[in-house]
Image: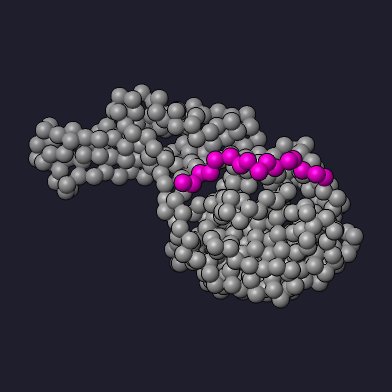
Amino acid sequence: MNEAIRRAAESHREAMKDLLCEIVSIPSLCGQEGEVVERLRVAMEDMGYDDVRVDAMGNLLGRIGSGSRLIAIDGHCDTVGVGDPSSWEVDPFGGEYRNGVVFGRGAVDQKGGLTSAVCAGKMLKEIGLPEDVSLLVVASVYEEDVEGVNWQHLVMEEKIAPEIVLLTEPTNMEIKLGQRGRMEMRVTTRGLSCHGSAPERGDNAIYKVTPIIKEIEELHNRLESASILGKGSITVTDVRSTAPSLCAVPDSATIHLDRRLSEGETLQSAMREVRNLETVRESGADVSIPRYEITTHTGFERLVEAYYPTWLMDRDDPVVLAAAKVFEDQFSSKPTMGVWQFSTNGVSTKGMYGIPTFGFGPGREELAHTPNDQVKIDDVVRAAEFYAAFVLSHIPDSQDVSDQFGPLSTR
């Protein structure tokens, strides 16, 4: 079977290259993924998927097989923006192929992995799935701005509960077991406005927030963790104030915090740390979690809280062991295992709902969001080979996923 899968992947090499170049050439920022979703929908139908549909949120779902054991392979089809166009050596939407590499925005993050997943579905359609297995390939939307919100919809609204979720974000062909969580906080101080010519008559909110910024920096240096995920982090990413005019003392000042959460750290513990800072207590500052209104390309609206839980799979989990065995059998070498630096849809699949989740994808994580965005076609083909081999392997029964899922980070 190993050689048959390898031959199948190689036979679709040119098709993978062509599809990837085409979808990289289609701009697909968050909330603007409609055109690339439609192109992938047509591709899935042409490849013979048994069922293809777009849900209310705009996620593309392609199913193969009718077995009771559902395995999902997820890749998000949205991308970040281009940034400064002059920093690019290629047209970011040219879908350029050169010397075995596809260049352009989203090539590595993460249309390369999505192409591998879609084409692995075609391979499995040709080879045939085990009778008890179904495969769901998901081209998810709105991940870059609000990771995991797509899978919150799939689980809670579409009632999709896979036995395993395989994420196709770039891993440099390693197996990824998790990531630090992420949350945002706002710390707001209040003052009293007055004319800038007599500041002693008022109470300057910026002066109150300044020592808080310094103590946030000190808090970051105190954070520790022995986890494989590394230590948590906290930093100030924005400072704003309000005042009647630039000739008036500010009556409020707000700092925006980016907090990365290591193993064992939660929304509650992170907020408690900030609220207990001496400067926060003395100033009477308010600490809150931002919420954002999002609208997807289908017009679907949702209010999202900026909290994305930490998640980590155990190296001895049966799903991880199965993935490692598939890698070794297919590529005749032992896999490297690690964790992502960035955040993924696993914050929902594993972090919120406890669905066994791991990652394997083409390309290098450090190229994501850069003007060097690129992925090797060799990696795309090998990833498709791995996905097909994993689905065809004898996957052990995974943990029981309860129908009673934990609380959502949405309201």
Query: Which residue shows up at 61% across the image and 42% down it?
Result: 405
Q: Quadrant of residue 138?
A: bottom right
Residue 289: x %, y % from top left: 42, 40
Residue 340: x %, y % from top left: 62, 45
Foreground residue among 190 and 16: 190
- Name above or below for residue 230 compared with residue 16: above
Query: Which residue shows up at 58% across the image and 69% down it?
Result: 37
Magenta span dominant secondary structure: loop
In the picture, measured across the screen, residue 272 lies left or right of residue 117, that is: left
Foreground residue among 135 and 51: 51
Quadrant holding the N terminus: bottom right
Residue 292: x %, y % from top left: 42, 50
- Magenta segment boundaries in residue numbering: 396-411
Foreground residue among 189 and 218: 189
Query: Which residue shows up at 53% across the image and 66% down it?
Result: 33
In the picture, measured across the screen, residue 315 lies left or right of residue 211, that is: right
**Residue 20 makes an appearance in the image:** no
